[in-house]
Amino acid sequence: MSMPVVRQISWIAVIPQFIALATGISMGWVAHGLEGMLVGTLVYLSYSFGSRFVIARHHRHGIKLSRAGEYSKAIEAYKMSYVFFSRHVWLDRFRSLFLLSSSAMCYREMALINTAYCQFQLGEMEPARETYQRALDQFPNNQFSRMGLHAISQLDQAPDASSPTTPPA
């Protein structure tokens, strides 16, 4: 069974992607007609996927590890992602321009939520609670943190009951 991934889209962040794609296609058309349009599209796609592959590599690696059930290793990858994007806040803030990412959540926010999710899956409830709370302190509107904290409090009240979990973003 594959683990679902939750993605929240910021539709306003899609606009720079369309502008970049339209620019690449237009420049290609002007320079070389139909063949240029194809080249412009390929350049856009290469940059879009390549920038996320290189810049967000720790995040992507963490998701891969989470899907494989290797939560301890995933936690380390998410922590590295958090550190990287904390050092380069401007890159995270303008991810729709630099990474052509339309995610509604920034990478730091996703790193914290995914770290807490992995801790929860490992049964490390106190670290998970602290990480969810840290995410909520930094990103007060994060519903995943609220759901995670609620799930942990439900487990505290009924230790034998299972609760729903939130998949990585």
Image: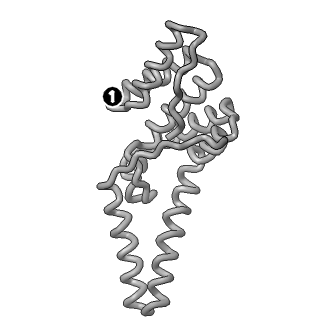
Estimate the x, y position of residue 117 in percent, counting from the top left. 55, 29
Q: Residue at x 56, y 42 (%)?
A: 4
Badge 1: residue crowd in 10 Å (few <14, some 14–19, many ≥20): few
The residue positioned farthest toward the left in the image shown: 12
Above or below, comparing residue 43 to residue 161 in the picture: below
Q: Is residue 62 above or below residue 139?
A: below
Residue at image x 50%, y 74%?
43
What residue is shown with label 1? 140
Give the answer, above or below, for where 157 lies relative to 89. above
Which quadrant holds the N terminus?
top right
Measuring from the top left, give residue 26's x and y in whole percent. 36, 82
- Relative to 56, residue 24 above or below: below
Q: Which type of secondary structure does the marked residue at label 1 adopt?
A: loop
Q: Residue at x 37, y 24 (%)?
A: 137
Dividing the picture into quadrants, the one containing residue 14 is bottom left
| Apparent side of residue 56 relative to residue 98 in the rendered image (left or right) | right
Return the x and y of residue 109 as percentages of the image width and height.
Answer: 44, 36
- Which x, y percent locates residue 150? 44, 19
Observer-nearest of 39 and 81:
39
Q: Which colour assignment does the render follow?
A: one colour
| Residue type indicated by callout 1 | Pro
Q: Is residue 148 left or right of residue 63?
A: left
Which residue occupies the foreground of this view, 21 or 98?
Answer: 21
Residue sitting at 44 percent across and 84 percent down? 37
Which corner quadrant of the image does residue 145 belong to?
Answer: top left
State the count of labels. Answer: 1
Q: Identify the residue at the far top of this view.
A: 157
